[in-house]
Image (cartoon, helix red, strand yellow):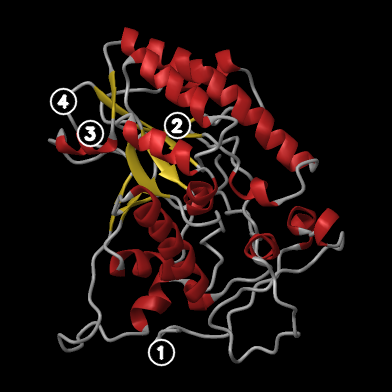
Amino acid sequence: MCSEDIPRGLVALPEASRRRFLGLSGAVGGAVTAAALTGCTEDVDQPARGRLSPDEAIIEHTYTGLSTRSEGMTLRQLVESSDAAAPDNQLRGVHRMLWDVGTQKPYVALSFDDGPDPRWTPRVLDALRDAGAKATFFLMGYNVDHHRELAHRVLDEGHDIGNHTWSHQDLAFQDPASTREEIVGGHRAIKEILGVDTNWFRPPRGELSGAGLRILAEENYDTFLWSVSRNVPGVGTPEVVAQHIVERLRPGAIVDMHDSIGRGLFLPQSDRIVETLKAKRDVDVEAVPAILEGGMAAGLEFVTMSTLLAAADAPGALTPATPEDQNLSQGPTTVPPRTATA
């Protein structure tokens, strides 16, 4: 059900340059489709649709990007839609977001998103085991459900578990009801299959709407971003990726890597974007042993997120991977203006 104080009828269409990525092809029809936001849309006329299987529904709603700005999903709108001075029976909340931890201990938290995936996760687990290192895995509920034995291996080998949504939708542009379903769906799979009641969350692509922040506060989640990532242009090589990450490690760093391909799982596997994602994951996973070796040679210890947080003794600090994130995709709608320098 939709919360009464959250705007309804939020509809988003992908901009033209991104529609090929979102198009349905092969078994689902081959036609490029403009995706509509789901959930709290009772006041928006939608064409009648046949019943979709769970997998088809995931493909159908795999989208990213808006053609226009939606004020209904900003943090300001979500806050102002309720009364900040309301009585105690009204919703109140606080949300914590972390990307780096201040500590004097030589700890680094290596984390992996999107898994578990039989193609990459076992190789990551083997590298961690061989190095005597621990990590944190932000798991997709869909992958936990489809690869249960592998998900249990992640847990059984002593790694921390976090929630990375059910099916890797872009939460910056989901309506509130769909955002909640992605967050709660991921949590439910992890809880029911692994018995882990995690309150750690990492949003796909590191993006959230105001609705997402509020829902995470309601669900008692902390959000984890990162201070170091692969951020190497293109596919790269294992040597370049490892060198890039090792050079940026320092105590308290949170490193973001991947052991699956997120939304790419729900697209035709012959798609060029999917092939590129797979190539990048192959490179990243192959780089893990060198990252572990290089960091440990520098005196650092790779630990779980819980161990890193327990060692916090100073305010967190922003440690960007590079002065400018050259490898990030362009924003879905606009390019931030830059002030001209003399």
| Amino acid type at mark 1 | Glu
- Marks 2 and 3, the one that precedes in the sequence: 3
| Amino acid type at mark 3 | Leu
Q: Is residue 333 visible?
A: no
Image coords of residue 32 (percent x, y): 83, 62
SS type, badge 2: loop
Q: Which residue is mark 3?
A: 308
C-alpha separation, residue under disc 4 versus residue under disc 3: 11 Å
Question: Measuring 50% from the left and 40% from the top, which residue is drawn there?
Answer: 115
Q: Is residue 84 above or below residue 63?
A: below
Q: Quadrant of the N terminus?
A: bottom left
Q: Which residue is mark 2?
A: 321
205 with respect to 210 (left or right): right
Q: Which residue is mark 4?
A: 104
Image coords of residue 300 (percent x, y): 28, 17
- Marks 1 and 3, the one that precedes in the sequence: 1
Q: Is residue 129 visible?
A: yes
- Marks 2 and 4, the one that precedes in the sequence: 4
| Amino acid type at mark 4 | Gln
SS type, badge 1: loop
Between 153 and 170, which is closer to the camera in this rendering?
153
- Marks 4 and 3, the one that precedes in the sequence: 4
Badge number at residue 4: 1
| Amino acid type at mark 2 | Ala
Question: Measuring 53% from the left and 53% from the top, which residue is drawn there?
Answer: 142
In the orientation shown, which residue stands out farthest toward the bottom?
A: 43
Circle 3 Cα neighbour tier, 10 Å, few/some/many (<14 / 14–19 / ≥20): many
C-alpha separation, residue under disc 2 versus residue under disc 4: 20 Å
Circle 1 Cα neighbour tier, 10 Å, few/some/many (<14 / 14–19 / ≥20): few
Q: Are marks 4 and 3 in contact (CB under 8 Å)?
A: no
Between 30 and 33, which is closer to the camera in this rendering?
30
Circle 2 Cα neighbour tier, 10 Å, few/some/many (<14 / 14–19 / ≥20): some
